[in-house]
Amino acid sequence: MNKTHLLEQVDYLVIGAGILGAATAMTLLQRYPHRSVAIVEKESGGAAHQTGRNSGVIHAGVYYQPGSLKAQFCQQGAEATKAFCLEHEIPFEQCGKLIVATSPLEYERLQQLIIRAQEHQLDVEVISQQRLQQLEPNIAGIGALLVKDTAIVDYKQVTRRMLDKVVAAGGQVLFEHQVNAIDTCNAGIEVTTSYGVVAAKTLISCAGIMSDRIVSLLGLEPEFEMIPFRGEYFLLPERHNQIVKHLIYPVPDPSLPFLGVHLTKMIDGTVTVGPNAVLAPGRESYRHGQVNWQDCRELLTSKGLRKVVFKHFKASVSEFKNSVFKQGYLHQVRKYCPQLRTSDLLPYRAGIRAQAITKQGQLIDDFLFVKQPNCLIVANAPSPAATSAIPIAQYIVEQLHLADED
């Protein structure tokens, strides 16, 4: 096919059919039912990357800095996601999360989380060691915080339903359309895909780990770069499907950007262990030995990444070692679930966390958006992005509305 052939001409074009892209297109059509909306997605279906490879948790927002977009979007998103599931008969389970302290240092850190939960006005309960044993006989700890509103869901199913709503409302979802070039013109934006050109008055990018490359395609110099951290999970044997009744999380180390290895009840009844956080040799390198040399060259020449690794060198080495040797990974889990053995860690899919960093080597912790005329790019959408997809989409649409008024 002639790659310059004009495929579509729409009012709004969304890049990416993960949950955020699907929610954005859905919200646009709800607000502007008479305008045309299309999604372009390089894969053959939706939710192929971060959305379909996460732990499936509907977070309550206990960890996030008050006043941050993370905190705001997460609390709104938890309520909105559950309401969406109820409306569309998508199963979810509000099982709650136990954040378990296993040492005096962790217990001290837990007190700060209790204060933060109170600041967020979350429905929580401080759990004593004795009460923890009653709630979770297979879990060891000296205290815990029960976050009651935390739930689990299949985000792939949520995304598919959102995409169905997009199509039912007159929108289009164009799968297997790899974005190769983006050009601005008087009428708006022209996006060249692997099948031709889609012209749009306004472009919204929800491209996840590829967001910095979308900025570059617009002819801009991104002030951030995306770093892929592979989150590796294990599946527990079926005999352990009832090992816990809640999600079990360790108390996070505030000096590290990730929450640690946890036990997660999945909506299909299984239980997973994970994730760790190890630098991946490619933006979509989900398996050991899967290397993207172009991505590796970018990682090796990244000054910002070198600064991040230097700052967190000990943790980086530990995560790499635990990725190679199960025993170190298991040690983290056995702090709060001592009965598990190495043979209990069965293979399971990995995910990639798209982590934005500055050129100065600072991890960007909050959501980040890049706005240009006729264009809005979701530059950084870390966890809890899946939980927060609906309010993020509403925020995006409101930003576009304000731009139209200017």
Image (tube, rainbow, N blue to C red):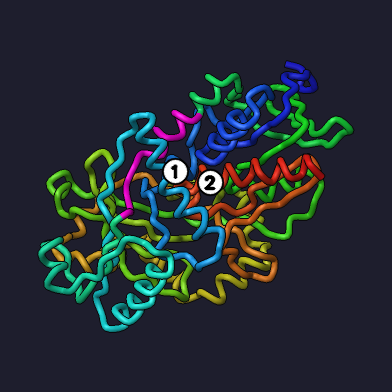
In the image, residue 6 above or below residue 73: above
Q: Was residue 160 drawn as part of the magenta stretch in this picture?
A: yes
For this rendering, which residue is in front, 359 or 96?
96
What is the crowding at mark 2: few (fewer than 14 residues within 10 Å), some, or many (at least 20)?
Answer: many
| Front one among 396 and 51 | 396
> What label sits on residue 80 in the rendered view?
1
Task: Find the distance from the CA under tag 1 to the CA under tag 2.
Answer: 8 Å
The quarter of the picture where residue 105 lies is bottom left
Q: Residue at x 39, y 33 (%)?
A: 157
Left or right of 236 on screen, residue 85: right
**In percent of the image, x 28 and y 57: which residue is there?**
148
Amino acid of disc 2: Pro
Snapshot quadrant of residue 16 = top right
Residue 72, percent across and down? 52, 57
Q: Which residue is mark 2?
A: 391
The disc, 1 or 2, on the residue closer to the chain's N-terminal end is 1
Residue 161 higher or lower than 332, as above or below: above
Mark 2 and mark 1 in contact (Cβ < 8 Å)? yes
In percent of width and height, residue 251 lies at: 33, 70
Q: Residues within 10 Å of mark 1 (few under 14, many from 20)?
A: some
Q: Which mark is residue 36?
A: none
Pick the residue in front: 384 or 6. 384
Q: Position of residue 281 (x, y in %)?
A: 53, 54
On the image, the x and y values in percent for residue 348 come to 32, 45
What is the magenta range?
149-162
What secondary structure is marked by label 1? Answer: helix
Name the residue located 78 percent from the left edge and 47 percent from the top edge: 372
**Which amino acid lies under the numbered mark 1 shown in the image of this protein?**
Ala
Q: Is residue 303 magenta?
A: no
Q: Is residue 186 left or right of residue 133?
A: right
